[in-house]
Amino acid sequence: MECIVNGAALIYSTELSTMPENTFDIVSKIDLQEVANAIQQALKEIHTRFDLKDSKSNIALEGKDAIVLQSVDEFKLKAVNDVFQQKLVKRGVPLKGLTYGAVESALGGTAKQRISMQQGIPIEKARDIVKLIKNSKKKVQASIQGDLVRVSGKDRDILQEIMSMLRQQDFGIDMQFTNYRTN
């Protein structure tokens, strides 16, 4: 469609103009650099603390998804774990993202425990999140994309309401809201 006003041609679009989509992602990630820093701080404290000084205790990062705690016995292992958790909390690493394995007996009579770190939202938790969003009857769309959930909608205020609703629910995982985009 074309309209001429005072000799200048103005072109009007006949397409329906759609409002831009606002989106955010729901993720569950643990910052490995912060975990490495917490390990260093915990080891420093363990090697100087009187009750743990000669306990041959160790904390090691195993790949990108696990931490191994090692000590002389279960009691000292629990003390090492407490020190490590304090350092994680101080560095802002969520403890909800850690899954503790059973305490195992290792070589030389030592105790060992493996802690796995959660990277990404498990598919069943993602389905629960999408179901909750859909049941809220808000005008937003939620979709599972790999290990994250993307929520999109036209109104920013509704997205903020969805965020606060999700913060109130406990899915057993730590959630962060990233990539908040308004167009």
Image (cartoon, rainbow, N blue to C red):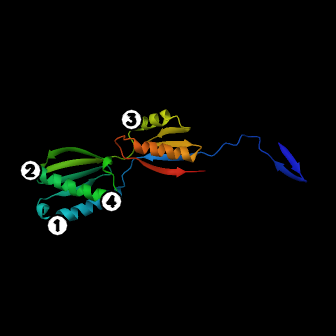
SS assignment at label 1: helix
Residue marked by disc 2: 109
Residue marked by disc 1: 48
Label 2: how many residues lie within 10 Å, few (<14), some (14-19) or many (20+)? Answer: few
Mark pair 2, 1: CA separation: 23 Å
Q: Earlier in the sequence, mark 2 or mark 4?
A: 4
SS assignment at label 4: loop
Q: Earlier in the sequence, mark 2 or mark 1?
A: 1
> Horizontal placement of 51 versus 154: left or right?
left
Mark pair 2, 4: CA separation: 32 Å
Residue marked by disc 3: 124
Between disc 2 and disc 4, the foreground one is 4
Q: Is residue 56 above or below residue 96?
A: below
Mark pair 4, 3: CA separation: 29 Å
The image quarter in which residue 26 lies: top left
Q: Image quadrant for the N terminus?
A: top right
